[in-house]
Amino acid sequence: MKEFSGRVVDDVRELRNALATFATGVTVVTTR
């Protein structure tokens, strides 16, 4: 169970990083 939750945390972290990158890209395009 601990391994599973750790994997989920990693996935969530990656997802948030991807979302942040995507949001930054959108912001850059919109501001331009």
Image: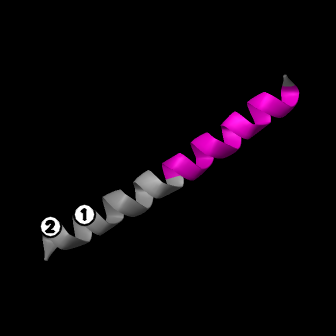
Image-based side of 30 in relation to 21, left or right: left
Image-based side of 7 in relation to 29, left or right: right
Residue furthest bottom in the image: 32
Percent position of residue 22, x then y: 36, 60
Q: Which mark is residue 26?
A: 1
Q: Which amino acid is tagged 2? A: Thr
> Which residue is under mark 2?
30
Q: Which amino acid is tagged 1? A: Val
Image-based side of 18 in relation to 30, left or right: right
Residue that appears at 61% across and 47% down: 13
The chosen color scheme is one colour
Tag 2, which secondary structure?
Answer: helix
As drawn, 19 above or below 12? below
Query: Would residue 13 be counted in the magenta stretch?
Result: yes
Percent position of residue 2, x then y: 86, 27
Mark 2 Cα within 10 Å, few/some/many (few <14, many 20+)?
few
Quarter of the image where the N terminus is located: top right
Quadrant in the rendering for residue 31:
bottom left
Residue that appears at 85% across and 33% down: 3
Quadrant in the rendering for residue 4:
top right
Q: CA distance from mark 1 to mark 2?
A: 6 Å
Quarter of the image where the C terminus is located: bottom left
Magenta range is 2-16
